[in-house]
Image (tube, grey):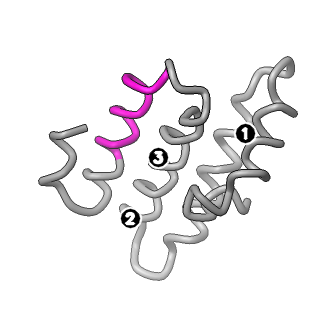
Amino acid sequence: MAAARDLRGAARYAAYAAGQAAVVAHVAAHELGAAAYAIKAVRAAAREGEGESAGRLECRWQRDQLPDGIRELVLDDQRLRNDICWSVFDC
């Protein structure tokens, strides 16, 4: 996580996504962090004017990867906490 601080744009968000995935598994309230940062990284890496669209595609792709057994649980959590996750789960 500290390595991400000096980075900017897509690289920073990608580093935060990796950090979140690696270090916050012990905190249930942080489980959406890696997914949210990955969407922010895709938005930042997209061509000018295409960030929102690219972010929605990434969000949909992530949702397509969810196993059936936890899909509704994750989607419900995204709806409940979207506002504290930069509203990246509006897809």
Q: Secondary structure at mark 2?
A: helix
Residue identified by numbered label 2: 44
- Relative to 89, say whether 48 is above or below: below
Task: Pinpoint residue 30: horizontal percent, then vertical percent.
Answer: 54, 36
Identify the image quadrant of the C terminus: bottom right
The amino acid at mark 3 is Ala
Residue identified by numbered label 3: 38
Residue at x 51%, y 52% (from the top left corner): 39
Q: Earlier in the sequence, mark 3 or mark 2?
A: 3
Task: Pinpoint residue 16: horizontal percent, then vertical percent.
Answer: 34, 43
Identify the image quadrant of the N terminus: top left
Residue at x 72%, y 39% (from the top left corner): 63
Q: CA distance from mark 1 to mark 2?
A: 20 Å
Depth check, front residue: 85 or 89: 85
Q: Earlier in the sequence, mark 1 or mark 2?
A: 2
Residue 43 located left or right of residue 64:
left
What segment carries the magenta color? 14-25
Dominant SS in magenta = helix
Q: CA distance from mark 3 to mark 2?
A: 10 Å
Residue identified by numbered label 1: 63
Binning the other alpha carbons within 10 Å of mark 1 as few (below 14), some (14 to 19) or many (20 upward) gives some
Check contact, mark 1 vs mark 2: CB within 8 A: no
